Amino acid sequence: MTSTTTAGFTLEPVFTAPGAHGFDGVEFTLRDALIQSGSGKTVFEQNDCEVPTSWSQTAINIAASKYFHGALGTPEREHSVKQLINRVVDTITAAAIDAGYFDGQDSATAFQNDLKFLLVNQKVAFNSPVWFNVGCMTLEPENTGGNWHWNKETKTVEYGHSGYNNPQCSACFINSVQDSMSSILDLAKTEGMLFKWGSGTGTNLSVLRGSTEKLSGGGTASGPLSFMKGFDAFAGAIKSGGKTRRAAKMVILDADHPDIEDFIAAKGKEELKAAALVREGYDGSGPDSEAYASIAYQNANNSVRVTDEFMEAAIAGRDWDLKARKDGATIKTIKAADLLRQVTTETHLSGDPATRFVRKASGPSTTTARRFIVPRGVRSHEVIRDYE
């Protein structure tokens, strides 16, 4: 592969022979896609899907239920993996030609056919928003659903009613929030629209005042956990990409937040509620069952953000201050090791929260972060030993 600053890339076929198409040599057949619940109820069904004979039933079910575009039972509904891959690859190739990425049609064709070969043979795969959105403007030219996109003219990110003309292709977005009702509600809209087009979101809510902090007009703040219930409910209601795929979101809270102990225990308490409902006869077989659909915090992955200072305090058995968001005053003092033990205990019970390290690097304003999940059964002193 070579390139110049004026003519674009020169590409030659690597996986396909010159003149061959990406699907050449791949055997296709008609198969039914069927997904059933634990009780045997049919959740999704599409018959006579054209798929490669080499694909597993799981791959067929995912492609048909999540990525085929159009209403079931209508002529507009996609029914073939060829249609799906052509829609995405042909659109990407056309956009690349328009942007001047190739030195000519031969290079564009080589790119187009090789990419189809890699996808149909499951050598590579795009993330879900690409399959959801790319190329759908030809299927739904009148769609006016709003999204954020890059405006090439103004060179800025803007929100507009562009539908599929500027498809949302990224898997994850990190969003910010400020300690105001307006910003909190703006975040709810932002997350909801990102979920609509199939992407996931993540936000650190540590800027929000704790549930014991005072408001300027009197009374106390609601605290991040109250708003987390609202965000979680929207994530459950807005199916990712408009399909049966669940929305994906992440919530982070700093280890010195006044509500950190409630945050750590939140999912475990909800698990107890679900267990009680199951004992009363409600279905608890899955995340959308009666028991689990009625409890909170089920659509988010929670993480506790810890620092070197916190881990060193846990190792040394020192105190750890939980601080007000507004003025930094100490609201409560606990043992750092006890807080870490709470994390490991709750993770053992419900799988959350995970721990996110933010470690100072070479300079005062430079940090590196890594996230790990404490395995079931691991005790807090073992986590500390691993850190050392």
Image (cartoon, rainbow, N blue to C red):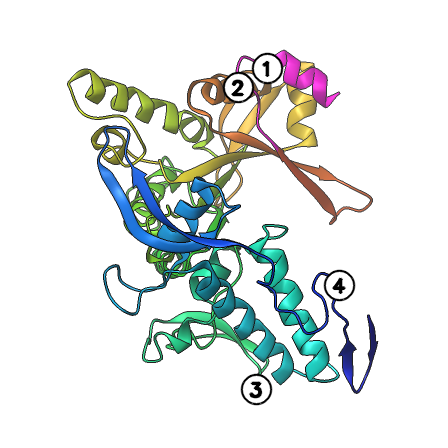
Which amino acid type corresponds to the residue marked 1 in the rendered image?
A: Ser
Q: Is residue 152 left or right of residue 13?
A: left
Residue drawn at (75%, 63%) of the image: 14
- Up the image or down, 197 lies above or below 110; here it is above
Q: Secondary structure at mark 2?
A: helix
Q: Is residue 334 above or below residue 45?
A: above
Circle nearer the N terminus (2, 1): 2
Residue at position x 66%, y 64% from top? 114
Residue 379 spot, x, y in % from top left? 58, 12
In the picture of the structure, the residue carrying the numbered disc 1 is 380
Q: Position of residue 381 (x, y in %)?
A: 64, 12
- Real-space CA distance between mark 4 and mark 2, rounded to the nearest whole angstrom: 49 Å
Pointer 3 or 1: first along the chain: 3
Between the residue at mark 1 and the residue at mark 4, the CA separation in whole angstroms equals 51 Å
Question: Circle 4 is placed at which residue position?
Answer: 14
Question: From the image, which quarter does the C terminus lie in?
Answer: top right
Disc nearest the viewer among 1 and 4: 4
